[in-house]
Amino acid sequence: MITEEQVYAALRECYDPEIPVNIVDLGLIYEVKVQEDHVDVVMTLTVRACPAHTYIREQVRTRITAIPGVRTVMVQVVWDPPWDPSRITRAARQQLGII
């Protein structure tokens, strides 16, 4: 059985190539749903015109697909609610030197 914890662990291995913090701690992940062998992820990006949009989305899909038992993954990028820096975790703020 696939767990949300496994999915979040995989997502913590995904990075925006311009920011040295994983996408979970950046607050880009809005929702994870696991249904048997299928995983849905709802996420956003820091800006609409993110040049790494395709790279990040494929990275998410690849990392989750590597979890044993996962057969399909749907990654949905949304813009509402818009991302803002308040979504960054405290640990990530420290890592980025903004705390």
Image (spheres, rainbow, N blue to C red):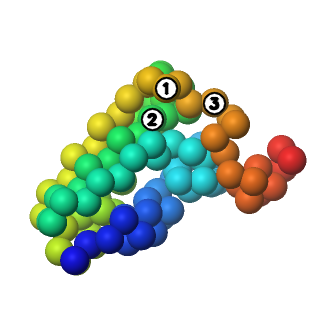
Mark 1 and mark 3: Cα distance apart in space: 9 Å
Work out whether 65 lies above or below 90.
Answer: below
Residue indicated by mark 3:
84
The answer to whether any part of residue 54 appears in the image is no
> Crowding near pointer 1: few (<14 within 10 Å), some, many (20+)?
few
Image location (x, y in percent) of residue 9: 45, 69
**Residues tagged 2 and 3 counted as in contact (Cβ below 8 A):** no
What mark, if any, has residue 81 been given in the picture?
1
Q: Viewed as shown, does residue 21 lie left or right of 10? A: right
**Kind of residue indicated by mark 1:** Pro
Residue indicated by mark 2:
44
**Kind of residue indicated by mark 3:** Asp
Work out whether 73 lies above or below 52.
Answer: below
Image location (x, y in percent) of residue 15: 51, 53
Element class at badge 2: loop
- Which residue shows up at 44% across the image and 24% down it? 80
**Residues tagged 2 and 1 counted as in contact (Cβ below 8 A):** yes
Image location (x, y in percent) of residue 60: 35, 53
- Which residue shows up at 60% across the image and 53% down it? 25
